[in-house]
Amino acid sequence: MATEPAAAEATVPSLVDRYFTRWYKADVKGKPCEDHCILQHSNRICVITLAESHPVLQSGKTIKSISYQISTNCSRLHNKVSGKFKRGAQFLTELAPLCKIYCSDGEEYTVSSCVRGRLMEVNENILHKPSILQEKPSTEGYIAVVLPKFEESKSITEGLLTQKQYEEVLVKRTNAPTATS
Amino acid sequence: ILLRRVICPDCFKPAKNKQSVFTRMAVMKALNKIKEEDFHKQFPCPPNSPKAVCTVLEIECAHGAVFVAGRYNKYSRNLPQTPWIIDGERKLESSVEELISDHLLAVFKAESFNFSSSGREDVDVRTLGNGRPFAIELVNPHRVHFTSQEIKELQQKINNSSNKIQVRDLQLVTREAIGHMKEGEEEKTKSYSALIWTNNTIQKKDIEFLNDIKDLKIDQKTPLRVLHRRPLAVRTRIIHSMESHYVDDHHFRLYLKTQAGTYIKEFVHGDFGRTKPNIGSLMNVTADILELDVESVDVDWPPALDD
């Protein structure tokens, strides 16, 4: 499950380590193990990604396709943002869907925003090559970029788990596999 | 005031940062806009006889601004170009502009200053070579006459006071000359050197192909690290040439010559795939940038002075 190279180079902090704080939301929308990882930049911009424990990132899963058409009237691809103040962006609440992932085994997963704010962009690279999402979920395989309101930049993390809290959740899961239905 | 009310009201829009609506730029814009016949109508020459006596409300004198230009080198990886203050709290001590301008403020006995430069670098980036052009406007200076010897001594004083920055070619210039500097910002090329780390081990032959790539076009989405204050856009930029120097199996140095406005750090690490192509994608590795230096800013202004 580890995507980082061996401990020999552990002293070099990655791009994500240098600029971002990792926040987590577990079992998003009540769906077991559908964990999301929000990378919060020091400038308050949030990058929405899948956490390592998400079903889509487990070995053996193949992604058939990804769609940003979340309803008949709304496609995240049609998000248009203009100017320094990002006018015209689609506004997202915590539960707003970002995309749908369709797997070859018939399973369908919805990725949610987890933070309130303006949608800056969704990752079009994973549309063309879904495997990037599984190969590099924390960088090239990101889902979306969200800009929270300036006033809310601290409060958005109140409902999220820290790296340590997330790891505790994972430990609890392996110890009690039947806990979540 | 007549110019504003009657001729061109939209040239004189009040803005938060300005003390007065009648800035030099606004007046010049209005004068350029007004048609010659209209101007003659409103402001005949000779003017009409005044109907009332003018009473003086207040007299305020101010010196015209003077401009000092030069080039600066930055040797610290912990120095912002402008003061870094958030919520009234200073995050990092000092700044390039303060280290240079504080001395000028004192000697010119000026009220305040405006610092501008031909582009800028991040806090953790050094500026080497013959430095980056800058210009400082000294507002309401009480002393404006200096010999070139005195300016040389002022330059020496600045250089002796700090090892974080050094200045050269310090000289008095006109307001018009500043245009040359800003021209450089958009049009000229810049050279850099970067220390690059790769996750996979590399051999000398793995980085040789970079030397042969000429005028590589890259597309850069606004980097995430500035997206909070810049519009979202895609910018096409050109990497004119590169030269790689092997360091060890996880590091190499890359010298690059690029178009102005290229984000080098993002060209190296790819910024989540939002800069394409990038060093990582070209080499099929995960790459990151450990150090960046500006080797040259290819603007030939201000004129070089012999020391």
Image (cartoon, coloured by chain):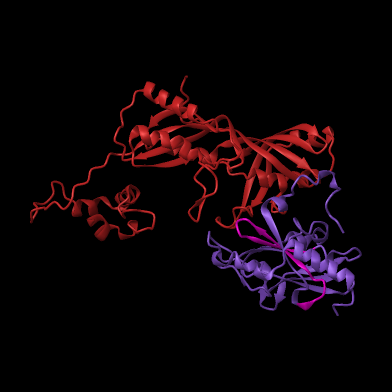
Chain colours: A purple, B red
In the rendered view, does B297 fall on the left or right side of B147? Answer: right
Q: Residue furthest right?
A: A60
Quadrant containing the N terminus of chain B is bottom left
Rendered image quadrant of residue A181: bottom right
Compared to A38, does B249 lie above or below? above
Q: Residue furthest bottom?
A: A181
Compared to B128, does B307 lie above or below? above
Rendered image quadrant of residue A9: top right
- Give, as a single range, the part of the protein colored magenta: A30-51
**Is residue A38 one of those drawn in magenta?**
yes
Q: Position of residue B284 (x, y in %)?
A: 81, 46
In the rendered view, does B71 fall on the left or right side of B122? Answer: left
Residue drawn at the location 24% of the way across and 60% of the way down: B6
**Is residue B156 one of those drawn in magenta?**
no
Q: Nearer the viewer, residue B129 or B31?
A: B129
In the rendered view, does B48 fall on the left or right side of B158? Answer: left
Instruction: Tell me, yes or no, if residue B60 can be seen here.
Output: yes
Q: Nearer the viewer, residue A76 or B167?
A: B167
Q: Position of residue A151 (x, y in %)?
A: 54, 66
Residue drawn at the location 85% of the way across and 66% of the way down: A171
Instruction: Tell me, yes or no, if residue A104 can be seen here.
Output: no
Residue drawn at the location 49% of the way across and 26% of the way down: B160
Instruction: Count the numbered circles shown.
Output: 0
Q: Position of residue B226 (x, y in %)?
A: 59, 53
Residue drawn at the location 84% of the way across and 38% of the way down: B202
Q: Position of residue B182 (x, y in %)?
A: 47, 40
Q: Nearer the viewer, residue A96 or B51?
A: A96
